[in-house]
Image (cartoon, rainbow, N blue to C red):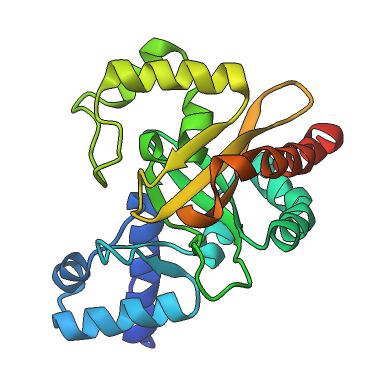
Amino acid sequence: MDEPDFLITVVDNALQVLDMAAKETEVRVRKVSEELDMAPSSAHRLLATLAYRHYLVQDPASKIYRPGIKLINSRALSSDTLKVRRIMRPHMESLAEATRESVSLSRLMGDHIEFIDGVESPRALRASPRVGARLPAHATAGGKVQLAQLSRQEVIDLYPDGLKSLTTHTETEMPQLLKRLQQCLKAGYAISREESTEGISAVSVPVYDSHQRTLAALTVLAPTARLPNSRLQPVLESLTSAASAVNVLF
């Protein structure tokens, strides 16, 4: 289609950025500046505006922009993902209220997990699951509980360049990761102790459908001091109960 005489440049630029985010899953200020031939300051304002409207979300550490909740909703998400979000939302809210901690729902995407929904703790000091954000799967409870469903070789193939370290607690040795994944599969849950973020711990269970297909991971995440081993059992019971809602309704 030929360019229309009435093309609105700023709208066209915004749509091109959303196309980049949907296709490549991450967008940087420099790339937007180069691709759209605009000043870095203008690219920054454009990305910040899209983030403000929840079409993008900015990773607080890397400053990279990724698809936000509105773009996730509008792009080609599988019907299963949309359904599991809709079913799980009230259970996530109840879980967050009962534990007074943040709750996230994530799905495995290659060697990363993507947060597809989240409910924040009402407490001032809390972990904040950012919908649309991604983290290396091997460094998160939600990632490990989903990686555990894969075969040994499938996991190895996901990490041809080795395991990236995010904190001093991140597992960086493949044999040890495989051993932990085997333990996760047997136990039915995974724990992360400051492996992706210093000071934050998490516990996660898989979300299955009625055919035992893994749809996502349901996670409670909190400051480490508020999630000691002594508190894991009641939290796990609440997580398992919430996750089972999908099994019944799928």
Q: Position of residue 126 (x, y in %)?
A: 51, 66
Using the image, determine if residue 236 lies above or below residue 173: below
Residue in view at x 32 percent, y 84 percent:
9
In the image: residue 120, left or right of residue 172: right
Using the image, determine if residue 136 lies above or below residue 122: above
Of residues 10 and 172, the one drawn nearer to the viewer in this rendering: 172
Q: Is residue 196 visible?
A: yes
In the image: residue 28, left or right of residue 230: left
Of residues 128 and 212, the one drawn nearer to the viewer in this rendering: 128
Residue in view at x 21 percent, y 71 percent:
29
Q: Position of residue 225 (x, y in %)?
A: 48, 55
Of residues 53 and 232, the one drawn nearer to the viewer in this rendering: 232
Q: Is residue 1 visible?
A: no
The quadrant of the rendering that contains the N terminus is bottom left
Residue 56, quarter of picture: bottom left
Residue 199, quarter of picture: bottom left
The quadrant of the rendering that contains the C terminus is top right
Residue in view at x 55 percent, y 56 percent:
226
Residue 154, quarter of picture: top left
Using the image, determine if residue 215 lies above or below residue 35: above
Q: Position of residue 108 (x, y in %)?
A: 49, 37
Of residues 67 and 218, the one drawn nearer to the viewer in this rendering: 218
Q: Position of residue 186 (x, y in %)?
A: 59, 16
